[in-house]
Amino acid sequence: MNANYYKTALNSIYEISVILNSSNMVQHSLYRSLLQMADTLSMSRGVILLMDKETNELVVEASIGIGTEEHPVKRTRYKTDEGVVGKVFSLGLPILIPDISEEPLFLNKLGRIKSDEEISFIGVPIKHEGVTYGVLAVDKVVSKMYSITTDVDILKMISTLMASYLYKIQYFESQIEAIEQERARIEAEKMKLMGEVSKKYQFEGLVGSGRLMGKVLDKIQMVTASDSAVLIRGESGTGKEVVAKTIHYNSVRSKKPFVAVNCAAIPGELIESELFGYSKGAFTGAAGEKKGKFEQADGGTIFLDEIGDMPMEAQSKLLRVLQDKVVEKLGGTRPVQVNVRILAATNKNLEVYVQSGEFRLDLYYRLNVFAIFLPPLRKRKEDIP
């Protein structure tokens, strides 16, 4: 074998591997691969046919010396048992025809121009792990400088690269399709659950038909159409969170998150990071950035239960959220914009807390834009069965 030709062939194989690894545009990548073969391996004509799963036929995907990149010989089709190409595909084995003019199986569907030179044909399957994706076929003028069987070996290596490339493309396409299907399933499940939750928190779901609960329902109906802060007041067990959810799921924010936070259940030293999040390195153990409850509720509603137990420093940050619609992460350098409706609740007398300096007056006014008082069941005897 000619040493220079062998070196050229190896270089061509390398260049084709670069081409195939640089793009997921199948037709363009295969066409460029054929050009590389034509430029360096003296292959006058080349064609790549791939299996069309819908029609179970071999279709010309790329060609050189016949047609153009955009119009590869009018997408010529072969049945899988038709002609030499079909035989290569069905057998899954290379076929070498030293002189195509002497071969009766040669159909010449691609309209090769007759030549005085002796033209050989080489067809190799594009196969990966037992699956045949198509056929790589070339015409070549017979040369006395080296054996045509050498070209068969070269084409087998190139077809292996192409098969691996097609496998990866199809694998990723199937994964993307699976992800899209899963996303659609999750979205459908989400919409179903949101519908169930919304139905659960319709006004009819609130227990009570007496005069006092009638007033509560009237106020809830008034605030659902608004986007203002609401302060829900009442003793423990009167259903403050149920009222908050009813407001949210009957408002324009119903398709967005509802995030509930019990301020009394979070230790004072952790409440800021829990509500507003923290940046990487904000404290020992902060290995990465974390979103706080306000960011999690973005676009929706945050329910701050037991607001009277919030520490003063956190109250100052909450005031800024109400005023400027931004949160400051612990250890952060830039404020984060949020769009959140705030519903707060308490069983405490906030007015006393304001007078004693335990609750900010300006925050009290910001939260108390609209107040709903929930009467305890002992005062609603008409609602007791």
Image: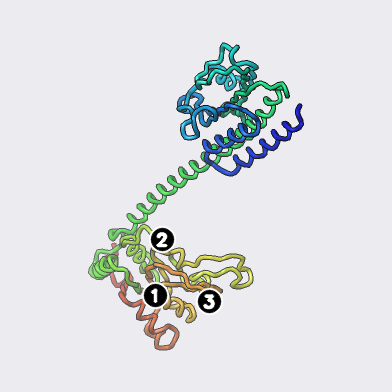
Q: Residue at x 29, y 65 (%)?
A: 224
- Measure the alpha-carbon separation of dots 2 and 3: 25 Å
Q: Earlier in the sequence, mark 3 or mark 1?
A: 3
The answer for how far apart the CA atoms under marks 3 and 1 are is 21 Å
Q: Which residue is mark 3?
A: 268
Mark 2 belongs to which amino acid?
A: Pro
As helix, strand or loop, the secondary structure at mark 1 comes to helix
Q: Residue at the location (39% across, 75% down)?
A: 322
First reached walking from the N terminus: tag 1 or tag 2: 2
Q: 125 and 60: which one is in front?
A: 60
Q: Using the image, tell me which numbered label, if any, was put on residue 257.
A: 2
The residue beneath circle 1 is 322
Query: Which residue type carries mark 3?
Result: Gly
Q: Nearer the viewer, residue 175 or 94?
A: 94
Farthest front residue in view: 116
Spot occupied by residue 364 in the image (x, y as percentages of width and height): 37, 80
The image quadrant that residue 85 belongs to is top right
345 left or right of 112 in image: left
Q: Secondary structure at mark 2?
A: loop
